[in-house]
Structure formats: structure tokens, C-alpha cells
Amino acid sequence: MIWVGLTGGIASGKSTVAGIFSELGVEVVSADRLAHDVIACGTEGARRVREMFGEGVMSKDGSVDRAKLATVVFGDPTGTERARLEGLIHPEVRKKSKMERARLEARGDSVAIYEIPLLFEKNLASEFDFIVTVAISRELQIDRLIRRNSMTREEALKRIASQKSQDEKIKGSDFVIWNDGSLADLRKQVEVVKTSLVTKRN
């Protein structure tokens, strides 16, 4: 099975591209979804988040308030809080992703996508057969992030700066999908990449 890493900067449109791959019949595993599972209400992960960051990041129902947690993590200029959170979540997410990969291989899938925002930041390129990066112009990325997350421009720039540059991601990728145009154009690009991946598998 070809294991494909799908990445890109924040608000670049990774989830939209992942959705199109899914519509085209390619199984998609989401690192963010696995991370949600790790700190879901009632889990050991949620209990440890409460211990690390306090009641201020928890909702009334006992679940982790991801928005409040993000404010704490990205509001720390030293990066200490982010490192603590990643040290808790990332090892568990990696375990779950390996289980998902094994499940899909056993099922007989020829190609599968792993949507992972921090692929390059965590030096995981060697774990994939191919890497696809979703790219976007900087101003459009900033605008989308401001509108999507109700951020100020300063907050958006800080969040973007916390990741590797788009140029670095493009250089390390086998395929680049640009998300500056229409949804129809985006779909055409995904179809081309999907066809190429299937051809390589065969």
C-alpha cells in the first residue's frame, strides 16, 4: 500500500483536499481527528491535560476546550507550553496512526492518505512513500485564518510563524496542490494527483 502524507500550512485547505480524496475513493486518516480521540472526554489524555494546564482549559462537561487550550499554548512565546502538550499528545497519535495504517494494509487498500499538519515540523517525511503539500498565497492564508478562527492579524501571523515555511514544505514534497482558485480547480488538481498515485502503485 502507498502511504501518502498530506500536509500544508494552517488554513491552506488540507481538510478540503482530504475530503476530495475521500470522495474519490481514497481512505483518509486525520492526525487531528486522532488527536481529538486522545484527549476526548473521559480519557486518560483529558485527565493529563487538566493536570498540566488546569481547569481553565476544560469545558463544563469535562472535555478539553481546544480553543482555550490553543490560547494558552500559542500565547507562550517560549514554546514551553506547546512542547508540553505535544509531548503528551503526539506519541499517542503516532501509535494510533500506525494502527490505522496496518488496518488499511490488511484490508487491501492500494493507496491511503494521512492528513498531518506537522509532517515536516516533526521530521516525519521518511515515514511516507509520497508527500502532498497544499499551498496557498500568503495573504489569502492570513485572511482565511482570521475569518475562520476569529483572530486578529497579529494572532494569525504568530500562528503561521509557528510552522515551517511553505517554501520548505514545497521543496520536500512530491506533489503540490495550489488552493488559490475555485473548488472546481482544486478538485481537478486532486484528481490528477490521485491518478498519479494509483499509477505508481500499479
Image: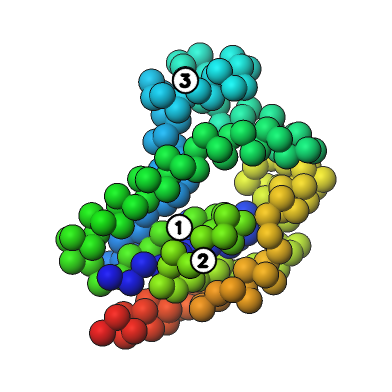
Return the x and y of residue 184 as percentages of the image width and height. Answer: 48, 73
Instruction: Give the quadrant of residue 163.
Output: bottom right
The reply to whether residue 137 is in sight is yes
* Real-space CA distance between mark 3 and mark 2, rounded to the nearest whole angstrom: 31 Å
Which residue sits at x=47%, y=24%?
46
Say which residue label 3 marks.
Answer: 47
Instruction: Give the quadrant of residue 74.
Output: top right
- Residue 196 horizontal side relative to residue 109, left or right: right
* Real-space CA distance between mark 2 and mark 1, rounded to the nearest whole angstrom: 13 Å
Q: Are marks 1 and 3 in contact (CB under 8 Å)?
A: no
Return the x and y of residue 151 as percentages of the image width and height. Answer: 73, 41
| Tag 3: amino acid | Arg
Identify the image quadrant of the N terminus.
Answer: bottom left
Say which residue label 2 marks.
Answer: 125
Label 2: few (<14), some (14–19) or many (≥20) C-alpha neighbours in 10 Å: some
| Tag 1: amino acid | Glu
Vertical relation: 16 (above or below) 149? below
Which residue sits at x=59%, y=14%?
55
Q: Closer to us: mark 2 or mark 1?
A: 2
Label 3: few (<14), some (14–19) or many (≥20) C-alpha neighbours in 10 Å: some
- SS at circle 1: strand
- Residue 76 horizontal side relative to residue 33, left or right: right
* Real-space CA distance between mark 1 and mark 3, rounded to the nearest whole angstrom: 26 Å
